[in-house]
Amino acid sequence: MVEICARCTCRHRAVRGHNRRMSHQLTLYENLANELGGLIASRVFAPGDRLPSIRHLAQQKRLSVSTVMQALRLMEDRGLVDAKPQAGYYVRHRARPLMTAVMADAEHLPEPAYVGINNLLMRVLKANEDPGLVQMGSAWPLQELLPMKRMQKTVAAVARRDPGLLSTVSCYDTNRPEFIRQIARRALDWGRLDLNEIVVTGSCTEALSLCLRAVAKAGDTIAIESATYFVLLQLIESLGMKALEIPTHPKTGPSIDALELAMNAGLVQAVLLIPNANNPLGCIMPEANKQRLARLLSQHGIPLIEDDVYGDLCFTPERPWPVKAYDTSGHVMLCASFSKAISPGSRVGYVVAGRYAQDIVVQKMISSGATSHFFQAVLADFLTGSAYENQVRKMRRALSQRIAHMSDAICETFPHQCTVSEPQGGFVVWVSLPGQVDALALHGDAVAAGVALMPGQLFSATGKFRNYLRLNCGNPWGPRTQAAIATLGQLVHRHADQPAVLRSAA
């Protein structure tokens, strides 16, 4: 018989009491997680809705803050909610996620191809211009999300303070010093910029075009993501260059293995990517991939043109760093603007050009001269203080909710074979349709039914993604948008059910 001393017995009793308390605590947070999960399942809280705050739940349920936090973390693990930085917990949409890829065998890259989308794109854009359509085509936020009143006051203040800016013209002096300083300050989180590397442009698109012209010539091959933004394809086509589509994962972006293979084979003269919130996939390249890519560019002496226009509208807890943050050799040209978050009409962008700054200044002089000093001064005023940070926080919250609502509605109304991207930033979703659906034919019927969209073929140099489409989620979520998604769902069902002979005739 084993004897236990009184001290040990007391200890064992204390441990058993602690375990009972722990068991009770587990039951409390699991019960809360189950209760909130039930409210989500019954649609009391719909996709994109914000849950009550941690403090409110603690007071309402008479629980500790730590218990409520445990419950919310458990709901995160179950895939029911997402934590948004400085905003709380939001109900996650129930989208069927996009297939893990669009990835092809990286060892068998496609052949570089000349691009030929301009004529088709212009027809689609013209059809989408009808003001009566529900606009899910072009990727612009609606005016109600933009700081119009603040911008009006800033424009008036700058005009009163320095009216001479309205008549300032220069062919060479393209940079406004106070605007340049604001760009540099905003980059302090990830690096220290050389002010001499910054060139102000007429838009992010102009910055991308200037970079292409500075580092490549007609007949050269540019590596791009697959899928990629159609304007990048337009630029490549307009300059007589070829595109090499790099296999791209809808979560992690382009395959670095495939890019390395293309560089080793001497296939590409430049790379053109959207590493943060790719358009149309919404993916963010992992930091390790960005670092590896920067090393490859330096080793091979190949320039990267980095489109970072959506970087500030990513839904991650911290703004993701650009590839430029890891650039030690000056081969990365970072292009961006404030058009998506402040004012599309201001037409001011910039490029942090690295070793190519002087070449880009020359290209800028030749093409358009200086960018408006007046609007540079306006943006510099807006960026001073906290107005811009408040604006992007507001937009991130609104856009993530709208994406969630639209994704959920797509899953409810489209055929079950359809899948939807889970964007980590921006405000578009990429939808795969049943294989027999032609997105171009669908576009024609959708416009006739009052809905604008962008067919998937426009996001590829070689006409891939014929059964994909991109939808803009910038519209307010309400009856009109819901009805438009329901209409699209009906049209997709109809196209999917069409006999093959009718589809080929169409």
Image (spheres, rainbow, N blue to C red):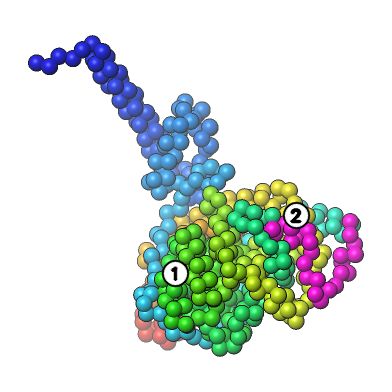
Residue at image location 55% in from the left, 83% down from the top: 117
Quarter of the figure with the N terminus: top left
Q: Viewer-proximal residue, 355 or 393?
A: 355
Residue at image location 85% in from the left, 55% down from the top: 157
Residue at image location 71% in from the left, 63% down from the top: 195
Q: Position of residue 242 (x, y in %)?
A: 53, 84
In the image, what residue type sits under mark 1?
Ile
In the image, what residue type sits under mark 2?
Phe
Q: Is residue 155 left or right of residue 69?
A: right
Q: Which residue is mark 2?
A: 382
Q: Which residue is mark 1?
A: 256
Q: Position of residue 399 (x, y in %)?
A: 57, 55
Q: Position of residue 170 (x, y in %)?
A: 83, 74
In contact (CB < 8 Å): disc 1 and disc 2: no
Q: Element under label 2?
A: helix
In the rendered image, residue 125 lying in the magenta stretch gets the answer: no
Q: Is residue 253 left or right of residue 364?
A: left
**Which class describes the residues within 10 Å of circle 2: few (<14), some (14-19), or many (20+)?**
many
Q: Please report the bounds of the magenta region as a residue range.
A: 161-184
Quarter of the figure with the C terminus: bottom left
